[in-house]
Structure formats: structure tokens, C-alpha cells
Amino acid sequence: MRTIAEINDKISRKCAVVWTVEELKARVSEVGVTQAAKEVDVIATGTFEPMESSGAIINLGHTDPPIKIRRCWLDNVSAYSGFGAVDLYLGATQVTETADGEESRERGGGHVIEDLIAGKPVSLRALGQVTDCYPRATFETTITRDTINQFYLYNPRNLYQNFIVGINGGERPLFTYLGPLQPRLGNAVYSNPGAVSPLWNDPDLQLIGIGTRVFLGGGIGYVAWEGTQHFPLQKRLPNRTPIGPAATLALIGDAKQMQRRWVRGCYFKNYGPSLMLGVGVALPVLREDVVANCAVRDQELVAPIVDFSIPRRVRPTFGLVSYAQLKTGRITIDGKSVRVAPLASIFLSHQVALELKQWILLSQFTLSEPVAPLPMDRSFVPQDLWGAQITLE
């Protein structure tokens, strides 16, 4: 029906028809897939959820005399410095170190990344490896996003295509990457916003590939590679959507363009810091089947209910539940009504899609052709300790 070049030409002339994915779903219910496909050029999807496998690459610029940094802290959060002399990688889940060498888990790398994006000053303390070309041993200063060279997010795993619903069938509270889980099925938590999220709407990654331009944290980013734990071979429903964790993306983008509204440090009680991140993907309507895929609704998407009370990699499950049911705030497990809440912000996920739509309508965002497809044959390999003795505490 269309090409990306033709759609970009319409975007540049501000005559492209752009709908959010929710608007598309509503239109399909009124006129059907075929007619909707004739009317729309681009479909904007979005999510705002925790993405802990994220971090920032920072180049400080050289000091005088020069220093080859081998240990470094940004606001007392350790940054990895095992490559170029003044290159750093700050992980979103790295915790704050206190003056006495202890860890404070309530603030971490995600909060420092948020502060830098917001233009706030961040203290830096560095220890160097003294060499003939890098004679300096220590360095302390204050940096901002404007006083460093490169500052970009490189996120090894973002945009889970699907995830799990966490519950706790044990006798004590559990503190997890899904937040607190109360004992005896006291609550349930899910993290994916459902049918508005990007990868649900391109289930076989026919439109999204390496080089795809995306909305990342309020700036422009790109798909850099498959994400870690990319598992497209997950079992799928007849509509091609996966029944559990499946495809993921690695994303990259200039953090100096980003906005604090869409990049927020967060903390999970008794678990640690993380990062809430807004990501949006614009899907070009190249064929009618693009609209058919994007018409999928929450009642047609499912996630597995997983019991965290068993401290093993493979945990008991209580079957599958639809996202429509999750969004009612109650699900039934073993005959018991259990309250359920999302980690993702459903409201801000819709706002990401709306913001991306506005960018396209204003010709501030165009589509890009992927330079290579993402692999669809990756298996999920566990790291079992063969022959090792495992102690469970």
C-alpha cells in the first residue's frame, strides 16, 4: 500500500494521517481493518515502565594533567570505568555508597541519570591509574549535562514484548523487582501496559529492526540490537502474541535531548533503585496486516501468573490471565479474588504515544528503514551451575 519514503514525504508536507494505537483500535471497531488501513499512515505506540537494564555512557573530557580513571563515583554512585581514560558507564540499578562503605539502596544510578537530564549538578570523585601519559592520581569536580562531552543512554534491554504477573503464595512478604508481594496471595503486580505497548502491535517484528528510530526518554533514539534475554521463540497465541516474556530491544539515544518527565529514577522497597523510562515506536502502515496486528485488544493478550515464594529460576505458575482482566484491578487465583496493580503507568504510556503523534504531525519525527532485521530464532538459555552445590537460604 505504501512505502516508508512515501510516508516520510507526507510527514514532511504535514499531511500524514497519524493515530495513536488506541485511536486505531477504536477506528477498526467502527469501520474494520480494511477501511482503517486506507485512512491512516502511521500508528504511534508507547509505554512508560521500569526498565532496569538501562544506563548512560558519559565522556567527561580530559583533565590537565590527564587522568586515567579506574574508579569513579557520581553522587556516590559507582560508575564503571574499565575502558577509555575518561569514559564511564553508569548503570541504572547501581546503588549509592555511603561514607562508611555501606550501601544505600534507596538512591542509585537511575536517580543520577534523571538529575543529569534535568540539568542538575552532580558531584564526581575519581581515582586514577598513574602512567607516563596519565600522571594524575585523583580528581574531584561537579558536572552537569552541559559540561561533559557525550551523554547518551545505552540500554541493553528495554521494551519487553510481554512479562509476568507476580504473586506470593508463601507466608512472609517478598520484596522483588515487581515491588512488594504480600503473603498468602495478598496482591499481584504486572509491569506491561498492555495493548498500547509497542511490541504487542508488531508481534513478529516485521516493522521494527536494527536502526528503527524511536521516541526514547523524550528524545530521539534508535534500536541498536536485539535486547538481552531476547526470546522470540516464546509460545504464542493464534494472533501471534506471546504468552510470556519474549522479544526485547537494545536502545540508544542522546540523553542531552531527553526530558526529565520521561526518564525518572525510582526505588523498589528492600530491592533497590531502577529507572522508569518512556519509549514510543511509530509503526508505518505499509500493508493492511499492519492494521490487523495493531487492532489487538487487551482481552486478546495474556500473561502468566508466577509465584515468587519458591526461590528458584523455574517457579510455579497459576495459568494465564488477560490484560483486560488485570486492568480491572482484580484477578481470581485458586478461587480467591486478588487485588492487582501495574508497575507501568497506563496514563503516561498513552501520553508517550500522544507526544510521538504530535512530533510526527509537526514534522519533528520521521520514520527510518531498519538496516537489518532482528533475529527471530533466539532461544532462552539458563546459566545452570553444573556440578556445583547450591545452598538456598
Image (cartoon, rainbow, N blue to C red):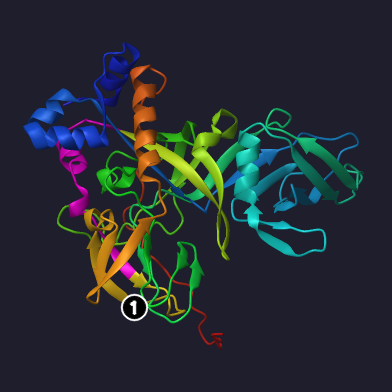
Q: Quadrant of residue 285?
A: top left
Residue at screen point 24% across, 69% down: 332
**Residue 267 in view in this figure:** yes
Residue at screen point 70% across, 45% down: 88
In depth, the one of 55 and 316 nearer the eye is: 316
Q: How many marks?
A: 1
The percent position of residue 179, horizontal first and vertical second, equals 48, 62
Q: Report the span colored magenta.
A: 283-305
* For residue 91, side relative to residue 46 (left or right): right
Element on which disc 1 rests: loop
The percent position of residue 368, horizontal first and vertical second, equals 37, 29
Is 90 colored magenta in this rendering? no
Rendered position, 191 above or below 186: above
The percent position of residue 33, horizontal first and vertical second, equals 10, 35
Tell me the quarter of the image containing the N terminus: top left
* For residue 238, side relative to residue 212 (left or right): left
Which residue is disc 1 drawn over? 316
Q: Quadrant of residue 365?
A: top left
Tell me the kind of residue under disc 1. Answer: Pro
Residue at screen point 40% across, 74% down: 168
Is 303 colored magenta in this rendering? yes
Tell me the quarter of the image containing the C terminus: bottom right
The percent position of residue 139, horizontal first and vertical second, equals 87, 43
Q: Residues within 10 Å of mark 1 (few under 14, many from 20)?
A: some
**Residue 209 in view in this figure:** no
Residue at screen point 45% across, 36% down: 222
Rendered position, 386 above or below 22: below
In depth, the one of 85 and 292 nearer the eye is: 292
